[in-house]
Structure formats: C-alpha cells, structure tokens
Amino acid sequence: MATFAEGCALLFGGSGGIGSAISRTFAQAGCDIAIVYRGNRERAEAVAVDAQAQGRRATIHKADVTRVEDVQTAIDDAIAVHGRVHTIVWAAGPLVNQRYLSSTPMDEWRHAFDVEVHGFLAAAQAVIPHMREQGGGSFVTLGSAGHDWWPARDGMSVAVKASNEQLVNGIAKEEGRYGIRANSVLVGVIDAGQLHELTRLGQIDQRWVDNTHRLLCLKRFGTAEEIGHACVFFASNEAAYVTGQRISVSGGFGV
Amino acid sequence: MSRDFPEGTVAVFGGSGGIGKGVALEFAKAGTDVAIFYHSKREAAEAVAAQIEGLGRKASIHQADVRDYDALQAGLDAAIAAHGRVHSVVWGAGPVVAQVNIADWSLEQFRASMEIEAFGFYHAARIAIPHFRASGGGSFVHLGSAGHDWWPHLDGLSVAPKACNESLVKGIAKEEGVHEIRANSILVGVIDAGQFKVGQEQGYFDAEWERNVKAMLPIKRWGLAEDIGKAAVFLASNDANYITGQTVSVAGGFGV
C-alpha cells in the first residue's frame, strides 16, 4: 500500500467522471476520502459506499465552490469527521464548451474562472492554516495537457487552468517551509466524463479522434484510473520531496 | 509500496552509485527484479545485489564502461538472458562531476562528460529500443538534474550533458510511443548521497553553500536516494502507462 499521513484526502469534484475514479483510486490505495459534490449526490454516495466496503472511512459533502462559505464548511466538516485533511484534490470544473477565444461568451468565461480558479484559491486559503498546524499537507490540482500545446477550441479549459498552475507554484514556494506541497496532474484525453458528454453534444466526432491520436506519442486515450494513480503518487509519502511540479498524463500530448 | 511492472527486470545503470543503490533497492521493494550495471565499484554492486536478494528478488550485476558500445550490448544481452526481459532502463550512470566554470573547463573535461553521460545514454537507448519493440514495450527513466530548471553555478559539466539527454528522452517518447515505449526524466535535486558527499568532503559544498541553497528550497531538507527511487519506480510501473515525455523534479521545489 502507498502511505499517507493521518486523516483524509478531500476531493473537490470527487463525484465527476474523472473525479470519481480518482476518489476510488485513493480509496483502493488505502486513503480515507471526503468527496465534495455539487449536484451528483448519487455518484458521490456510490463511491463512498464502495470505499467503506474496502474498509475506508468515506464521507460526502455538498458544496458550490463559487461560494466561499460552502468551501469553508466542506473543509470544516471533513476535519470534524476525519480529524485531519492531509490532501486537497482539486478536480472541480464545469463542462468546458469547445469555443474559439474570439467567440467565447464573457459570462461563460467568467464562470469558468469563478469555479476553477477562485474556487481553488478559496479552498487553499481555507485549508492552509489547518495544514500548517498539522505539520504539512499537499494540493493536487487537475490541469490540462493543453498547457504544453494549445488545443484548438479548448481555451476555456487551458487558459483558466493556467492560473491554477501558477497558484500551485506559489503555494509550493510560499508554504514549503510548513511541509505543504503542491503539484498538478495535466489531464490528456481521457475516456470518461467530458469526452463522453462532448461527443454526445456533437462537439467531438470521429475526425477529431483520428486527428488527436496523431498528436499523441501513445496512440490511445487514457483512463480515469491513470489520472488517479498520478494524483495518488503526488499525495502520498512517496512524493515527499516533490513540489511545484506537473506531470502530464496524456500519452505524450504536446511533447 | 508494491506496484505492477511488466515481466522481467529493470536495468539500473549506475546502480552501484550513491543514488543508484537507493534506486535499485526501491525497485526491489516494489516487486521487480534488478539488473545492476556498474563501471568500477564491483563490491558496491555486489552488496546491493545481496540486499536485493535478501528482499526475495532476483539480482544480477553487469560491468560495463558505457562509452564501450559492444560491452553495453553484451551486458544487456546478459541481463535479458538472466531475467527473460528488460522492461525498464534507469539511467543514473555518471562520474563525480567537477565543479568548474564553463569558461575554465578543459576541453577534455567536457568531452569526457558528454561521452559518458550523453553518448552513454544514447548507446543504452539504441541497444534497448529493438528489445523493447520486440517485447511489446518498455520504458526509460533518465536521472537528470534539477539544475535544468535553474542553472546551478559551477555545475555545468553535469547539467549540459543531461540537457542533451532531456531532448533524447522527448525524442524517444515521440518516435517510439507507437511501439508502447515510454521515456521520462527525473530532475534530481540535492541528494544526501553519492556526489554530494564527495563534494562536501572536497569543500565545494560548505556551510555557506548549504545555507544559501536551503534558503532557496521550499522544502528545507536535502533529498534522499529513496526519494529518487520512489519516483523512478512510479514512472517505470504500469500505473504510469499513460505518462511519457515528462520531467518530474524531485528536488524539494528547487527552481520553482
């Protein structure tokens, strides 16, 4: 088993297509989990129940991450039940419509920042005092493999997440002295969640699939579990000397 | 933590070194056999092999000067014969690096560094790739330098050849990915083992140097060989099957 500090990993977006697989991977690796969901209570509960069946303590917490009070409450409740939050996994984010920058509606653009960036800063500010007091902790954010190579029409994902990449660097640099680490998993094309939804909506088709394979070193899409494994590595004691880093789990997108 | 690997063994080049020993042991603890490649420190290689066998894994040792292509080929063939397959190559071979300004390098110093670290890695890759292709895949884990992110004064003889290898790692990832061959690099920070200890004895890394470097590090300690080993194990394992062409700095945040 991987080793973790006492307490739980708190996963924002832990009920999402990729987020739920990450939550499961943490549980399988021996880590207690607290899953934060916005609307998908059923999936959050299903993941929690499976984790409990494996002997993990697992809780679910409803929150709208654009509301600072919700974020604070989720963190406080997780600490109350689990005793300590050693890891924040930041996997929260709305479905990202595929748009050119030149025709991106301002309200969608602002909403993406509200959820993904302001939500993350709120979570970080809320939990850092606790982590300092506990002698450490870490953040694992989900970024985009497009960080390394601009993916056409995915600006609302990549440009928004770029802010969080810098927040990861800043938290790593400013909080390292307190034993707090921060790293990012850059997510490639994963056969789950948003890929399925965007295909259903017709924003992604077979031509897009073929063109994308050509851009990859490894000629296939990834699994949500592969994202989970990288998150677990960063969160575990195995990565105790790793901070301010990003690993692209994307089959070599942008290499 | 035990992990899943493909069948066969990891080949650790520089497996008798201060960091290489730690890396070899972490692979054994994680549940795979280890083939240790060494240049001159035979006793150290034998000692690591004995420790690995004590953990219940199979170990073999192979002597080679990495500048000698034929010797490397013979060594890898022997490792394959002993273990059935080499699934991963960890590149940690390299001499103790003299701390010298670029402007003061002798021509021979730079040539030697490039021949051992860059040409050596290229040799190992050229030899391993056909085996990996024939085996359905494999991966390279290169041990680079955290100085890749932030130039470390006087350490050019380490950083420059490794920079060549960083490019080769990306190229191997891109060109061989279609054969399920992956390649990644660990940027190694200040590790309390091997070359660092030698440098401390020689007075390069004195108390003032330590104070200045620690002031820059987000995580206020030196690394351990096992920190490098655990990252290498992750990158070589099946859990990292969708990760290629990446660099991960295991350096306490050096250069962030």
Image: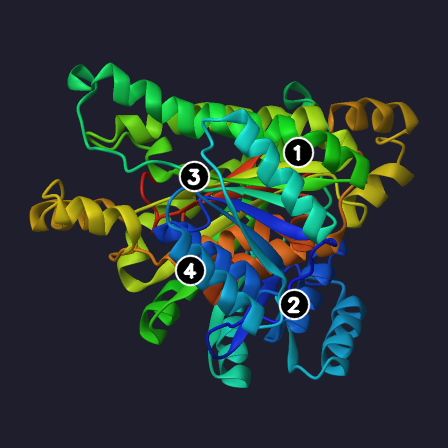
Q: Are marks 2 and 1 in contact (CB under 8 Å)?
A: no
Residue identified by numbered label 2: B1
The residue located at (35%, 59%) in the rendering is A223
Horizontal and vertical percent for residue A8? Answer: 65, 52
Residue identified by numbered label 3: A92
Up-down relation of residue B71 to residue A95 (above or below): below
> Which mark identifies residue A225?
4
- Sort mark 2 into few (<14), some (14-19) or many (20+) by Cα contacts within 10 Å: some
The residue located at (80%, 35%) in the rendering is A133
User: What is the secondary structure assignment of the residue under circle 1?
Assistant: helix
Q: Are marks 1 and 3 in contact (CB under 8 Å)?
A: no
Chain letter of the residue carrying label 1: A
> Could you tell me how far apart the alpha carbons at marks 1 and 3 are, in whole angstroms?
16 Å
Residue identified by numbered label 1: A127
The residue located at (84%, 44%) in the rendering is B198
Q: Are marks 4 and 2 in contact (CB under 8 Å)?
A: no
- Sort mark 3 into few (<14), some (14-19) or many (20+) by Cα contacts within 10 Å: many
| Quadrant location of the C terminus of chain B in the rendered image | top right
Horizontal and vertical percent for residue A170? Answer: 60, 23
User: What is the secondary structure assignment of the residue under circle 3?
Assistant: loop
